[in-house]
Amino acid sequence: MQKTIAQELSESIAKWRSGDMGAGLQKVAKEALAELVKAGDAEQPAEEPEAVKTDFAFEPAKSSNEEAARIAAGQSHSWPACAFLLSLQDCQMVKAVNSFFEKQAAFGSLPGDLQKFLLAVSASVIREGHKKKLDLMMLWRTFAAFGDRDMFLLQHLRIISEGAEGFLKALPESSEAVAREALGADFDAVAGEGYDADTLLRVENMLLMYGAGKLLLKDTLLEMKANRRYGVVGHNGAGKTTLMKEIVHGRIVGMPTHLRCVHVDDSKLGEMSKSSLNALEYVKMKAMEIGVTDASAENLRRVGFPEKMFEIPVAELSTGWRMRLTLAVSMLKHADIVLLDEPTNHLDQESVDWLGDYLLTLTKSSVMVISHEPKFLNKICTDIISYKDKSLVYTAGNFDAFVMAKGIKADDIEALLSGNLKLDEDEEGEEGGEEKKAAVVQAPITGPPKIAFPIPGSVEGVKSSSKAVIEFKNLSFRYGKDKDYLINDVAGKLSLGSRVAICGRNGCGKSTLMTLICSEMNATEGKVIRHCNLRVAYMKQDHLKTLGPYFDTSPLTYITQRFKNGYDEELQKRLIEPEDDEEAARRATLAKQHGKYGNQVGELLSRSKQGSQLYYEVKWEGLDDPKQNTMVSLKTLRDMGLDKVVIACDERIAAKAAGLDQRPLTRREITKHCEAFGIDEEMCCNQQIRGFSAGQKVRLSLAAMFWTKPHFIAVDEPTNYLDVETVEALAKALNNFRGGILMIEPKMDFVEKVCNETWTLEDGKLKVEKLDNGLKRVA
């Protein structure tokens, strides 16, 4: 085969070498033949052919097509400028643009090639506008934005010609003149149809669907203007968040493609805890990912970051400051459309006030906000968009103005913001026909919020609700030896009757202190001591992350897997596994000093009391024979740095003592438990967690938290994502809870409904204050 190919190739090369195919192929043939001879696949010819100097010429085209003949002759084509466009109207628009530009002195002063290029660009804009079904007025606005937005093109044209810069900057005014020339007398009539210079997004007859075909919006207008801030209200399932996601991904049919959109939510906050970058490095890295090269400390200053926090690792920032960092990253895009989904979550009141002030400065952007906070909506909103009968209804003014304009009763406001009331019209049959009867609101689309916590039972060895069950002394924490103390030498006691709120500004260390008290983080100095029979449940600020691995399962499956042995498997992992490599190394070092034969503890199997001291049965790593197990004192285990491992064992023993290992994980039992948190049987057994709203996921987290019937609970911002009515239900449930409560909550009105004591953390110190509100545990 190879010889056959070589022979055929040799014949072709011989023809090329002769020069009949021109000088170029003769040269190629000479080089190819040399390679074949070198490889032994051909013989060197005895004579060298005479070199030719003429190029090969194709035979004249035999086609009678004049255009083809001109191309074959090397002449430019004679197609009309708009021949590639799709409609007569487009051709007329191109001709109008060309005619207008050619009359302009600035355009005439440009080099000829540059004139042709700009005319080609304008024709391309018109063609793309036709494809996207933009009307002439939207094309006019596209031209107007061309010189202002395409800075890359502007910089390069400036290099070619100084006159190009002035020409492009004059496009906003020139484009209106072009549109007037193209539309003639119809310009003023068309321009008055909802368009003005501030319109950034306008899509008429919009259709919005979700999933496999659920219709959310039909034949409605979507309009957003610069320096306007739109609050969005509507019932649960109306499609508020879906609309935001479709906008940010540019999936709205007819939406201009040049718009820059950002969606600000808290979906990335959990990932930040794994970052090794500081705040400034994080912003610069995210800027590079989106092609922005001028990110600097100024981006952090704009969102209220003080200089001293620029170098703080992102993983050490509080959730509130991470939200600000998320906003800083989002605004790197210089967005036209800013979409915020529940932006006040994780923010204290000072930060909420700052956010409102910041949004008021975005005069060139259009802002859309989903929020359950009427005070926040009143501060920022210029318009309210409400969902009604699968349409978007626009009302000028803030939320109070909307309530007044729609005649909504005061009793219905909370239900409206909760998403539990519709603004749709009722349809009633009358004499065989149907007519729509206007109604301000319909009856609730869901039942009233329901949350009820199980009775925890008594703690063995604790006879008084005022006796301390958790105590900490000389407690201090800092992220490194070269860092300042975030928590500095604090002390406190908590009992089954405690109703305590940890207060303070974002970033002061509230969540860190709570995590230390719950023994899920190692203190730099000091100790946390808790009763060995106490069952504690801790709902972290990023608790929704725990649901992540179970998103494609139902709550029934989630509860079954997480509590398959009666105790909380997720809690066991957090307590037993080292926090990081440093803790793992420290455990190994201490084991060599205190462990049996220098081995580490493999597992704690049981607990007993000898006199006043607690001892734990230890199974050692590498010693599988049960006879090698030994009883080790609590003090020795603490000396080995295993405080959290001890607590994990105590939790397992306490769960078994309460009979939780015998609690049936049946459909009936789990459904009954979840119903106490507002999750019905259909949701519990047949729906995937992925499809739950954020508020429903919070309810599920609460349900999971209370499966072990804890004596003491710690909750970090439990009202995030919850509507107003559910927040009220949660407050009642907490007041009726027969155990101790430690919480972090920025909403002071909620704190005052539940707590009777505040611990204010400032500069690493705790200030304890009793609240004179008469609240105490209901027992």
Image (tube, grey):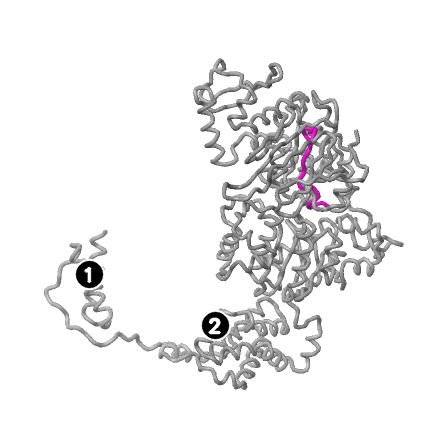
Q: Position of residue 693 (x, y in %)?
A: 68, 45
- On screen, 500 above or below 310? above
Circle 1 SS class: helix
- Residue 324 horizontal/vertical position (percent): 60, 53
Between 573 and 120, the one nearer to me in the picture: 573
Could you say which disc has been placed on residue 155 in the image? 2
Mark 2 element type: helix
Q: For the C terminus, which image quadrant?
A: top right
Residue at position x 64%, y 49% in the image = 212
Question: Could you say which quadrant of the image residue 71 lies in?
Answer: bottom left
Q: Main secondary structure of the magenta part?
A: loop
Task: Give the residues in magenta.
Answer: 706-722
Let me know if residue 250 appears in the view.
Answer: no
Q: Dot 1 surroundings within 10 Å: few (below 14), some, or many (20 or more)?
A: some
Q: Where is residue 243, by image quadrant?
A: bottom right
Residue 488 appears anywhere in the view: yes
Q: Amino acid at mark 1?
A: Ser
CA–CA distance in space, label 1 to label 2: 54 Å
Q: Is residue 714 magenta?
A: yes
As drawn, the label of residue 10 is 1
Q: Is residue 274 above or below residue 359?
A: above
